[in-house]
Amino acid sequence: MIDLRNIRKSYFVGDRELPILKGIDLSITKGEFVVLMGVSGSGKTTLMNIIGLLDKQTEGDYTFAGTSVDGLDDERLADMRNTYIGFVFQQFFLLPYLDAIENVLIPIVYSKKGIKHPREKAKMLLGKFGLEQRIHNKPSQLSGGEQQRVAIARALVNDPEIILADEPTGALDSKTGGEIMDLFQMLNEEGKTIIVVTHDPKLATFGKRLVRIEDGAISEDITT
Ligand SMILES: Nc1ncnc2c1ncn2[C@@H]1O[C@H](COP(=O)(O)OP(=O)(O)OP(=O)(O)O)[C@@H](O)[C@H]1O
Ligand SMILES: [Mg+2]
């Protein structure tokens, strides 16, 4: 599903090259639940943005869903993202003027999958996450944990195979964060491939595989 070979990423500040990722080799297959851990600045978001086809590596090869994505243009990359990936972020990124169900429906606008009965689907997902009484609430009328569950429903409405979550519990207290990780576990048991970034060691055991990144390189890759 995901195959990264000797991925390097540098930023250029003026004419100085800043190496951020220093030769990442990583394969992730369908059905895995990977927790990607590392301290702040180690390169987790940089790596996730490459995995999620939001950014390109400076060097190395990336094969995603059987396709070498290195030479693809932005439109093709956007198509692949919409087809395969659901994104979850620390800051939820819900639209404040839309209610929960309308937020969940946003990806349908860009979808080419022809999802049937999207409104029922959005309602079903919100219900599954315990939000049946909240579907007409605006984000400001929801707790942080509820907002993140709406964001996860939004990530799922287009039936992606993969969920990429960058610090999804970072804005939540530890109990609520644990509930979000439980929810990812449930989705993984239903067959979704999940990659979650965190710098919280307490969350390391939620996945089935722990990949640790230190200073732009993988320092540990174990089955948990
Ligand atoms: N556009 C950029 N230009 C220059 N340097 C950048 C840029 N984006 C990120 N960096 C640097 O790359 C390094 C890795 O950043 P990254 O966001 O991947 O870290 P992270 O592991 O996600 O950290 P955190 O846990 O704080 O989110 C940092 O030193 C950061 O300052
Ligand atoms: Mg980050």
Image (cartoon, grey):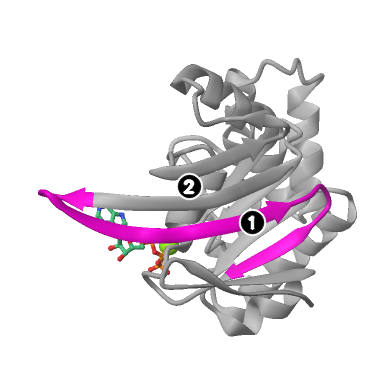
Under mark 2, the amino acid is Asn
- Total numbered labels: 2
* Quarter holding ligand 1: bottom left
Q: Is mark 2 on a helix, strand or loop?
A: helix
Residue 153 visible in rendering = no
Q: Which residue is drawn at 32% across and 52% down?
A: 10
Please name whichever residue, 125 or 143, is drawn nearer the observer in this view of the structure: 125
Please name whichever residue, 106 or 190, is drawn nearer the observer in this view of the structure: 190
Q: Is mark 1 on a helix, strand or loop?
A: strand
The picture places residue 99, in percent across and down from the top left corner, at: 56, 38
Q: Give the range drawn in magenta.
A: 12-36
Whether the residue carrying mark 2 lies under 8 Å from ligand 1 is answered with yes
Is the stretch drawn in magenta largely helix, strand or loop? strand
Please name whichever residue, 42 or 157, is drawn nearer the observer in this view of the structure: 42
Residue 50 visible in rendering = yes
* Image-quadrant location for residue 183: bottom right
The picture places residue 170, in percent across and down from the top left corner, at: 50, 69
Please name whichever residue, 195 or 129, is drawn nearer the observer in this view of the structure: 195
Residue with the mark numbered 2? 49
* Image-quadrant location for residue 149: bottom right
Quadrant including the C terminus = bottom right
Q: Distance between the residues labelled 1 and 2?
A: 14 Å
The picture places residue 144, in percent across and down from the top left corner, at: 53, 63
Quadrant including the N terminus = top right
Compared with 98, 117 (above or below) is: above
Task: Kindly give the residue lying farthest to the right in the view shown.
Answer: 190
Q: Residue at x 76, y 61 (%)?
A: 33
Q: Residue at x 52, y 37 (%)?
A: 53
Residue 20 part of the magenta-drawn span: yes
Residue with the mark numbered 1? 26
Whether the residue carrying mark 1 lies under 8 Å from ligand 1 is answered with no
